[in-house]
Amino acid sequence: MQLTTEIYSLVKFLPREETYALSNQMRRAAVSIPSSIAEGQGRNSKKEFIQFIAVARGSLWELSTQLELCGRLNYLSPNQRANAEDLICEIGKMLNALAGSIQSPDSSDD
C-alpha cells in the first residue's frame, strides 16, 4: 500500500500528455500489487495464492520498468524515484519470501 501511495504522488510530476498513458499504467500496476495479494489470500488453496503472488510480482516488475522509463525520458529525477525503487526492491524480496513459505513442505495444506 505504501508503494501504491508513493506512485500516486509521483505520477503528478509526469507531463500532462502522459495522463492517460504512462501515469495511468503506473497507477494500475501499483494498485494491482496489493490487490493481487489480497485476492490470492482470499482464495481457497495455496496453489491459487501462489498464482496471485506471481501476478503481483509481474505487476511489480512492470512498475519497475515504468519508473526506469520515467528516468530515461527525464520525467522523474533519480531522487524522485529513489523511495519507490527502494520499496520495489523490498516488496520483491517479501513476495519471494511469501511464495517460498507457502510452498514450504512445513506449511499446512489447504
Image: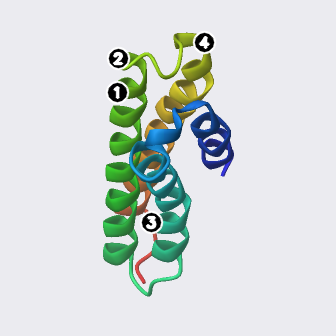
Residue 69: which numbered mark, if any? 1
Q: Amino acid at mark 3?
A: Ser
For badge 1, the amino acid type reads: Leu
Q: Neighbour class for label 3 at 10 Å: few (<14), some, many (≥20)?
A: few
Q: Which residue is mark 4?
A: 79
User: Pointer 3: what residue?
Assistant: 107
Q: Is any atom of residue 104 visible in this view?
A: no
Q: Nearer the viewer, mark 2 or mark 4?
A: 2
User: Of the residues under marks 4 and 1, which one precedes in the sequence?
Assistant: 1
Q: Quadrant of residue 103?
A: bottom left
Q: In the rendered structure, which disc, 4 or 3, sits on the residue that comes first in sequence?
A: 4
On the image, the x and y values in percent for residue 78 come to 52, 12
The local secondary structure at tag 3 comes to loop
* Of 51 and 107, the residue lying toward us: 51
| Residue type (three-letter) at the residue carrying disc 4 | Asn
Q: Nearer the viewer, mark 3 or mark 1?
A: 1
